[in-house]
């Protein structure tokens, strides 16, 4: 039988709900999302459940992290279906605020994480991570979770949150959720819904390239240039494809390296297919 799920649409009801969990001495887990949930999100819910007693999921399409208005307006939404799926998975509550509740009149207080947020997605999407760090800080303040789960799909975002939690002493455990893929290997993303079947087939070259690079790494290749060249081989020359970056980076500060190490190195990729920005990454561990 489906369990009852609470849906908080105001800050006051949310605070009361959080208080109730805390008063019972239960450990609260948070999974922040922008909704249009897929199995990648649900895997984070499951992880959160393993690390806490009650899981709250926030669904908020955060305008502050969109530098492109069209992208924000197009972002897919299906709140009733999301709630149904979360209820089926035993989530205790959903927090679904409006932008006005999160960003009150004359909002001025932004959280910026330097360096880590200036490269890759941050370089291509100015202000994006300022929006992310700010909304996550607000959610942390509102929900006071003991643990929060973020996906490795957005590896740079994950590192920024981890950095911020340490630097600003939030005292929240951050759990990393592995990147979940479709059966054919494409990284699951709410944005995949925009791909035509032809674009989707093209997009597979991203994950195939990453896996090819990892195979080479497994066989001993450490030269970043060669790993990247292998990862890009299938993508280059494809029509309607724009490669934003494909880079071998250290996992701590996400700086580009010339040589992959036996551990602690990752390939980050952002590729536009038919105007849809897709990101993916793969960890290199010997
Ligand atoms: P979003 O709704 O895109 O803001 O994502 C919410 C959370 O789900 C973030 O922590 C993402 O990293 C995570 N996430 C999104 N897609 C995946 C995926 N394919 N595998 C694992 N986590 C994911």
Image (tube, helix red, strand yellow):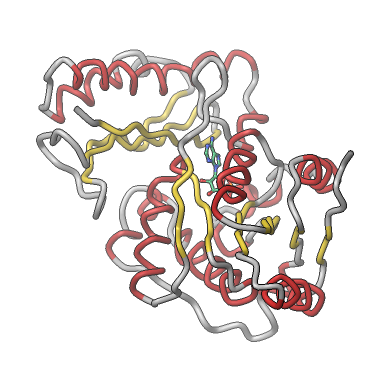
Tell me: 157 left or right of 54: left
* Above or below 117: residue 264: above
Q: Quadrant of residue 197?
A: top right
Q: Point out residue 97 in the picture as x, y percentages from the top left corner.
A: 75, 66
Tell me: 35 left or right of 248: right
Quadrant position of the N terminus in the picture? top right
Quadrant of ligand 1: it is top right
* Residue plotted at (37% across, 37% down): 244
* Residue plotted at (66% across, 30% down): 194
Tell me: 241 left or right of 220: right
Q: Point out residue 246 in the picture as x, y percentages from the top left corner.
A: 30, 33
* Above or below 174: residue 101: below
Q: Point out residue 105 in the picture as x, y percentages from the top left corner.
A: 69, 84
* Residue plotted at (10% across, 27% down): 223
Q: Quadrant of residue 238?
A: top left
Residue nearer the viewer, 281 or 85: 85
Residue nearer the viewer, 263 or 120: 263
* Residue plotted at (83% across, 42% down): 84
Residue nearer the viewer, 284 or 228: 284
Q: How many marks?
A: 0
């Amino acid at each position: 039988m489906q369990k009852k799920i609470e849906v908080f649409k105001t800050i006051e009801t949310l605070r009361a709900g959080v208080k109730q969990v805390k008063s019972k001495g239960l450990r609260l887990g948070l999974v922040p999302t922008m909704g249009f949930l897929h199995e990648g999100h649900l895997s984070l819910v499951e992880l959160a459940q393993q690390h806490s007693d009650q899981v709250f999921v926030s669904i908020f399409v955060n305008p502050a992290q969109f530098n492109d208005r069209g992208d924000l307006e197009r972002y897919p939404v299906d709140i009733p279906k999301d709630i149904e799926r979360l209820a089926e998975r035993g989530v205790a509550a959903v927090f679904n605020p409006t932008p006005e509740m999160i960003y009150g009149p004359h909002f001025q207080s932004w959280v910026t994480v330097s360096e880590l947020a200036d490269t890759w997605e941050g370089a291509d999407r100015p202000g994006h991570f300022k929006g992310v760090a700010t909304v996550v800080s607000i959610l942390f303040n509102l929900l006071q979770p003991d643990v929060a789960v973020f996906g490795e799909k957005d590896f740079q975002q994950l590192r920024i949150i981890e950095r911020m939690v340490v630097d600003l002493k939030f005292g929240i455990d951050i759990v990393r959720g592995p990147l979940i893929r479709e059966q054919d290997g494409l990284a699951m993303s709410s944005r995949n819904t925009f791909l035509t079947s032809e674009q989707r087939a093209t997009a597979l070259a991203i994950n195939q390239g990453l896996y090819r690079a990892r195979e080479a790494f497994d066989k001993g290749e450490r030269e970043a240039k060669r790993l990247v060249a292998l990862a890009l081989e299938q993508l280059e020359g494809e029509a309607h494809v724009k490669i934003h970056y494909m880079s071998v980076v250290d996992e701590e500060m996400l700086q580009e390296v010339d040589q992959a190490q036996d551990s602690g190195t990752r390939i980050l990729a952002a590729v536009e297919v038919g105007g849809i920005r897709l990101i993916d990454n793969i960890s290199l561990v010997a």
